[in-house]
């Protein structure tokens, strides 16, 4: 795919209103879950992102009908025409592996190509594979993808080695129609996981949450359809709040509930941000400037890894030394050289800074950063490797001196709802040839 390019001219503080739709990390998973129903399901408040188109194309190949009208997506399940997700989808996103469980229920066999998504670190498929084997599936990993077969999945007890979002989703999607009870220990509890579980419950699944990251699923014989409205994307909401702060402006974000932003609101407040919060919107400003902070990413309810990329740019505009310790993905800081080329003063380390030793301690992974601010950033010509890093580059370009050319912005469009329109509405001079 040819890199898409944006040309950005700094145009002063970003101000105005942004409305966020449902999360990229939720909509595609709901689309996969809808495969399991015996009747159509509708997902409302869906974002207009590339991820939706990729997932819809996979579902249509498998034999499902996908109807998109405005912000609504309706999935009409049908008999599986071909339980093999085409290799053309290799590396495009993480969704194919989540289709293994549903395809085993619907067709007794499946093939999915190797997973992709953003190059932010290893997201091993072994958690998914071992979980499906625990349900009784035969799973083999080949060079081009994963083959699986099963006459009937049977409930089981699974303890995840790490509370992986993707692996928890795989287990949920396999467990709801498996025979008997499934207990997931050390499950992820991100809002998008809860949202998926609630959607499956609306379809007729037997799901209950227990303390200590435990989810219990009582398998049922049949699921129906469901209608749901996705809650606003917490990653996108935070990103736009930071867009206002980093440029000395203020952005009012509509559509994302406060309870999804509890941790980052407090983090930004400690840095000197002032908030106005209502039931309908959240607004942040920093009229007296920003203080540095030490932040460690973690699984929910900690500070999400997807929040740290805009935060890193904000650190460059805070007065002092800030520290970021990434504990979720070992290669998440791969975007730092691009920011440094724009004048950011950031050093990365393989030690655990700003928090206790994490699982990347002594691995050699560069997963901590020290950022010096306030730094005058300068315009640059940069290529961004993934969705969240792409957004950070836009923020850096918005506060820089001089114009910037950003390449690889198709990544941003894969995960953010109509970002060109949103940024222009906030006053950013953005040209998208």
Image (cartoon, helix red, strand yellow):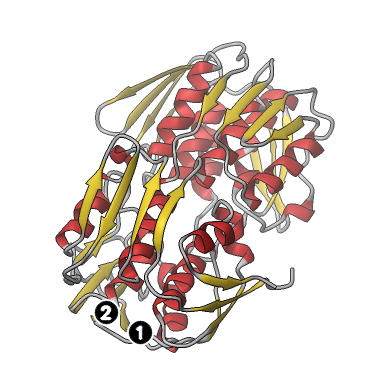
Residue at image x 68%, y 43%? 55
- Dot 1: few (<14), some (14–19), or many (≥20) neighbours within 10 Å? many
Q: From the viewer's perspective, is residue 82 above or below residue 287?
A: above
In the image, taking residue 232 as reference, residue 137 lies left or right, namely right
- Res. 197 mark: none
Give the residue at the far top of this rendering. Answer: 221
Identify the secondary structure beneath mark 2.
strand
Q: Nearer the viewer, residue 358 or 18?
A: 18
- Quarter of the image with the N terminus in it: bottom right
Q: Position of residue 32 (x, y in %)?
A: 63, 34
- Dot 2: few (<14), some (14–19), or many (≥20) neighbours within 10 Å? many
* Among numbered discs 1 and 2, the one appearing first in the sequence: 1
Q: Nearer the viewer, residue 234 or 55?
A: 234
Q: Position of residue 345 (x, y in %)?
A: 31, 86
Residue at image x 78%, y 53%? 87
Residue at image x 50%, y 14%? 180
- Quarter of the image with the C terminus in it: bottom right
Whether residue 135 is visible to the viewer of this picture, yes or no, is no
- Res. 344 mark: 1
In the image, taking residue 212 as reference, residue 184 lies left or right, namely right
* Count of picture labels: 2
In the image, taking residue 59 as reference, residue 271 lies left or right, namely left
Q: Are marks 1 and 2 in contact (CB under 8 Å)?
A: yes
Q: Quadrant of residue 413?
A: bottom right
Q: CA distance from mark 1 to mark 2?
A: 8 Å
Q: Position of residue 407 (x, y in %)?
A: 61, 76
Q: Residue tagged by mark 2? A: 371
Identify the secondary structure beneath mark 1.
loop
Whether residue 354 is visible to the viewer of this picture, yes or no, is yes
In the image, taking residue 407 as reference, residue 108 lies left or right, namely right
């Amino acid at each position: 795919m040819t890199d898409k390019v944006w040309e950005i001219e700094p145009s002063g503080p970003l101000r105005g209103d942004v409305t966020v739709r449902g999360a990229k990390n939720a909509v595609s998973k709901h689309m996969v879950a809808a495969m399991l129903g015996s009747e159509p399901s509708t997902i409302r408040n869906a974002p207009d992102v590339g991820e939706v188109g990729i997932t819809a194309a996979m579902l249509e190949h498998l034999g499902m009908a996908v109807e998109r009208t405005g912000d609504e997506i309706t999935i009409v399940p049908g008999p599986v025409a071909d339980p093999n997700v085409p290799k053309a989808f290799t590396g495009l996103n993480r969704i194919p592996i989540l289709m293994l469980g549903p395809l085993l229920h619907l067709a007794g066999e499946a093939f999915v190509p190797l997973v992709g998504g953003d190059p932010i670190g290893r997201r091993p498929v072994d958690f998914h594979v071992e979980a499906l084997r625990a349900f009784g599936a035969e799973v083999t990993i080949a060079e081009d993808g994963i083959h699986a077969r099963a006459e009937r999945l049977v409930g089981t007890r699974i303890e995840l080695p790490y509370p992986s979002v993707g692996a928890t989703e795989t287990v949920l999607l396999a467990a709801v129609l498996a025979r008997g009870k499934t207990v997931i220990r050390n499950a992820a509890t991100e809002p998008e996981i809860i949202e998926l579980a609630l959607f499956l419950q609306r379809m007729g699944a037997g799901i209950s949450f227990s303390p200590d990251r435990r989810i219990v699923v009582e398998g049922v014989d049949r699921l129906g359809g469901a209608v749901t409205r996705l809650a606003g994307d917490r990653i996108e909401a935070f990103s736009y709040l930071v867009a206002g702060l980093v440029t000395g402006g203020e952005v009012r974000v509509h559509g994302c509930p406060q309870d999804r932003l509890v941790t980052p609101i407090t983090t930004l407040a400690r840095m000197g941000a002032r908030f106005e919060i209502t039931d309908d919107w959240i607004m942040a400003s920093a009229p007296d400037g920003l203080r540095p902070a030490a932040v460690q990413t973690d699984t929910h309810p900690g500070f999400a890894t997807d929040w740290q990329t805009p935060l890193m740019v904000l650190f460059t505009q805070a007065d002092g030394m800030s520290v970021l310790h990434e504990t979720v993905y070992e290669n998440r800081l791969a975007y730092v050289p691009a920011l440094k080329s724009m004048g950011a003063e950031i050093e990365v380390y393989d030690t655990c800074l700003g928090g206790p030793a994490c699982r990347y301690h002594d691995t050699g992974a560069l997963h901590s950063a020290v950022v010096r601010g306030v730094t005058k950033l300068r315009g640059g010509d940069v290529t961004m490797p993934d969705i969240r890093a792409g957004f950070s580059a836009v923020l850096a370009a918005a506060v820089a001196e001089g114009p910037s050319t950003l390449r690889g912005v198709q990544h941003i469009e894969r995960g953010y709802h109509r970002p060109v329109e949103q940024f222009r509405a906030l006053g950013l001079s953005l040209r998208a040839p």
